[in-house]
């Protein structure tokens, strides 16, 4: 990872910049008005339902990620003030 970020960090940044530019171009050009399903197609769900789906999906991803990541973080880096060594049984049972 360090090798990739040190030597190719510029490439990652350039790629993200280009992808954002391409998305903005497609969104604001004539291609942004293309309607899937033809000119008479109607959406199945409302904008409010899209918002609700996106919100609950984001919350669900956060719960799944932090449900596992937070205990591992506390196990690998317990508070230094308490003098608990990382990756020990004491760190595993620390609350």
Image (spheres, grey):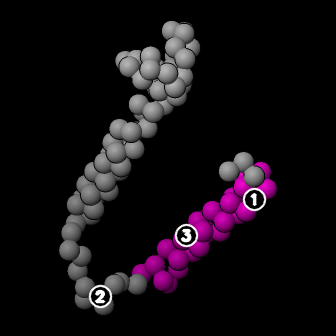
Instruction: Decide which of 24, 4 is in the foreground and name it.
Output: 4
Whether 41 is drawn above or below 57: the answer is: below
User: Could you say whether the residue bearing mark 2 is in a helix, strand or loop?
Assistant: loop
Q: Position of residue 80 (x, y in %)?
A: 56, 14
* Crowd band around label 3 with a 10 angstrom C-alpha radius: few (<14), some (14–19), many (20+): few
Instruction: Decide which of 68, 39 is in the foreground and name it.
Output: 68
- Nearer to us of marks 3 and 2 is 2
Whether 50 is drawn above or below 62: the answer is: below
Q: Position of residue 47 (x, y in %)?
A: 27, 63
In this view, the residue farthest toward the top is 82
> In the image, what residue occupies the spot 39% across and 39% down?
68
Q: Is residue 43 left or right of residue 85?
A: left
Question: Do we see residue 34 in this rendering?
Answer: yes
The region drawn magenta spans: 4-33
Q: Earlier in the sequence, mark 2 or mark 1?
A: 1
Q: Main secondary structure of the magenta part?
A: helix
Q: Position of residue 88 (x, y in %)?
A: 49, 21
Question: Mark on residue 79?
Answer: none
**Is 19 within the magenta?**
yes
In this view, the residue farthest toward the front is 89
For marks 3 and 2, give the CA distance. 22 Å
Residue with the mark numbered 1 = 8
User: Could you say whether the residue bearing mark 1 is in a helix, strand or loop?
Assistant: helix
Question: Mark on residue 24?
Answer: 3
Residue with the mark numbered 2 = 37
């Amino acid at each position: 990872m360090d090798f990739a970020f040190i030597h190719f960090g510029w490439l990652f940044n350039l790629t993200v910049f280009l992808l954002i530019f391409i998305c903005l171009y497609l969104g604001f050009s004539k291609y942004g008005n293309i309607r899937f399903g033809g000119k008479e197609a109607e959406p199945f769900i409302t904008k409010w339902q899209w918002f609700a789906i996106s919100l609950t999906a984001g919350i669900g991803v956060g719960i799944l990620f932090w449900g596992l990541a937070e205990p591992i973080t506390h196990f690998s880096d317990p508070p230094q003030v308490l003098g608990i060594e990382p990756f020990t049984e004491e760190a595993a049972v620390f609350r």
